[in-house]
Each structure stands twice: as C-alpha cells, then as structure tokens.
Image: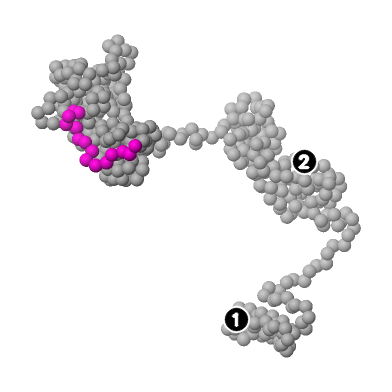
Amino acid sequence: MAARKQEAPDSREQACMLCRRAEADPDTCGRKVEKHGLCAHVFCLFFANELFQQELQDVGLMGFLPEDIRGTIEQAARKHCFVCGESGATITCQETGCDRSFHLPCAVEGGCVTQFFLQYRSFCCEHRPEQAVQAAPEENTACLICLDLVGDRKSYCTMVCPACKHAWFHRGCIQGQAVRAGISCFQCPLCRDREAFVSEMFTVGIRIPFRLPSWENSQAYAALSERHSRCDARECLCPGGREQAEEEGPWRLLLCCSCAAEGTHRGCSHLRNSTASWECDSCAGLGTGKRQSTRVPLGWGQGPGKACQRVPRVGLAEPLCFRGAGGTALAYPAPGLGGRALDLPASPYSLQRQLGARRPQHRQPVRIGAFPRLPGTRHQQPEHRQPGTIGVIPRLPGTQHEQLQHRQPGGIGAVSQISGT
C-alpha cells in the first residue's frame, strides 16, 4: 500500500498508463517507453489483459496498438488490485475461475508470480506455482548472495536450488543476479547447474533477460580502453597546453613505455626529436625498462633505472658494454659515448690497457666431443671408432694402455679411457 502512494498526479516524470506508477522496480517492470502520447512499462504491456503484440514492433508502442492499450485501460478502471486496493489493475490471475487482479509493481508485495517467458502468464498468491523440491534450510543458513539469514523453511521469499538442494537465497537476491547475468551465464551460485535451475526460476517468476551478461557489455569497460593523452611533466612548455599533441617535433606526446599511464612532450622533458620512447620517473625507479631509447654507458655502481644518468669522463678507454632496453648489457661499443664511472671501469680489459698489463693469451679452441685426459695418464692417440658403436667405456686404474678409437661416420661419440686402469 505504501509503495502505491509513490505515484503523484502532478509529478514531473510521466507515469505508466497501465500501473499508474512513475517509478517502479526495473527488474520487474522493465524500462518505460513513450510514443504517440502513450507511456508504459515494457512488461506492463506484456502482462496486461487483452493486449497482443503485432508482428511489426514498429507499429504503435513496441507493437501494441494504441487503441488496444486504451481499451485495456478502460476495462482495468473497473477492476481493483487485491494487493493495494486501488483501481486500474490490468493483470488477472490465469487460474480458471479466479478473478483476482493486481498491478505489476504490486505482484511481489502480494506474493504473486509472473512468468517472464512465452505466454507471460500471471498467478495470484493462492494459485501461484511452488517449488516441488523437498528441502529445508539448516539452522543459521545464509543467503549465498547477500549473506543474510534466510527463513526457516522454503517460501515465496526463500528459494532453493532444485539440483543441489543446498543453495539457499532470497527471491530479490536471485532476481538481481539473473538480471546481471542474463540467460547465457545464469546458474546456481553453488553447484553451477543450469538446466534444472533456469527452468525452475522461470517457473517461479524470476525474470531472466535474453541477452549477454551486463559485465560483457561493450560499453562497460570503455573507459579502460581510453589512451592517456596529456603531458604530466612538472612544467609543460607546450604553447597549446598539456592536452595538445603533434605528430612529430618537440610537442609530440610520448607515453611511458612501461606503464602507459603517464606522458610527456619531447620538449617538456628535453628529449631529442629522434627519441621514440620514454619512461616515467616511477617506472624508471623500479627498473622496469629504459628511460630513453638511446643507449648510455653501464658504469659500476649504477643500479636499475639509472641508465639515463650521464656519468663524467675521466679519460679511460671506451667501454665494452653498454646498456640497452631493460638494462641489458650489450657487448659492443656505442659510438660517441666515452662516459665512465669514477670508481671502477666497466671492463677488466680496459683496466689492463690502462695499467699496461699483458692481455691473456689466445686459448686453443676446444674440440667438441673430446673428453679431458685425467692426471697420471699417458698421451694416447685416438683411433677411428667402428661404425654403429656408441663409445668406448673408460677403464678403471690398473689396466694396461689402450688406444682410443676415432669415431667413424655415423657414430655418436667416443669416451676416453683412463690410463692406469
């Protein structure tokens, strides 16, 4: 009764012509549509008596002819809602011989069931379909959705999953979940059953929209796909302001190559016009990537994220290693850069050249597949290995001298013998 008093004849918002309410629960009544001077909730049209939708929905109000709507309103003026007691009830119980009528927004308050599929049938509190499953909630059982306690037995407001018989929830809670999930994702919140659960919910009057879930709406995450488009330098020097960006030149906007959450004009960070990438101070401090795309020397004592700093030159030899993207040491010199840290050089070879030390002699190439000779063994000339043999097993100390066999084409490899075995 209190809910019906929300309607106001001189309210600024136009009221539905069928339920006479300007504001109603959209989960139950749907949205309001207005056309040709008519205004009604979508499901007030579908559940109203003697209203039939035409094949062409462009006709009238969503396919309902204006003259049919006005005729239904005239007939409803002589019927009173058994819930709120006011006239204009456009929905009548489908049970044969029952003449109870009600407004669609009053259905939940009066314990009525409205089935949102196929024929859109409605039933009063006396003839409504009930859940046939035999189950009762245990003591202190909570709703799986709102976590509040449910009733001590199955009822119109307390429902249970027909599949697992352990998932209990309130009617209003499961109705809200059905509207958000849609027909494609609606299922039992506990056992994830779909077939029996969806069929039961349709029967007891839960509206399940025939659409994708609301969280997969293309516009739901539109803000996440927006690209950062402003300069975040402490002092923006661009004449057009922080939002101004050009394709090339000093006012081209560069986004952080690590987080893309901050940006700067080339000129505002004193970058060259050839600089193609840049890293913000926050990411540079974490060492997640390069500060600029140009390579700078890797000196001793420089930690991650400090690659952008210029170090003084002290006349030492050119470095052998330079830092590239992500702080990676690159084994080739960068032309035009002779910077070096003050404490130690970047390479032991550069220190040797400064001190006049002799470079280490060139090592003999290591032959792949040859095993080293253990101490105490005599020099052995290997022999060719017989085709198809896997290798010669080394002999233990105390055995006579034997020669190794050279590998024949197709052999896998030879295992050296240990002399003195």
| Residue in the picture at 54% in, 35% down | 227
| Residue in the picture at 77% in, 41% down | 310
Q: In this view of the protein, can residue 8 be seen by the observer?
A: yes
Would you call the spot at circle 1 few (<14 residues within 10 Å), some (14-19), or many (20 or more)?
some
Find the residue positioned furthest to the front. 139
Q: Where, quadrant-wise, is the C terminus in this rendering?
A: bottom right
List the residue tagged with mark 1. 390
List the residue tagged with mark 2. 310
Which of the two residues, 316 or 172, is positioned nearer the viewer here? 172
What SS does tag 2 mark? loop
Give the answer, above or below, for where 235 lies relative to 180. Answer: above
State which region is magenta: 124-139
The amino acid type, in three-letter code, at marker 2 is: Arg
The percent position of residue 306, horizontal first and vertical second, equals: 72, 42
Residue 248, located in which quarter of the rendered image? top right
Name the N-terminal-most of marks 2 and 1.
2
The amino acid type, in three-letter code, at marker 1 is: Ile
Q: Nearer the viewer, mark 2 or mark 1?
A: 1
The percent position of residue 237, horizontal first and vertical second, equals: 67, 27
CA separation in Å, label 2 and label 1: 58 Å
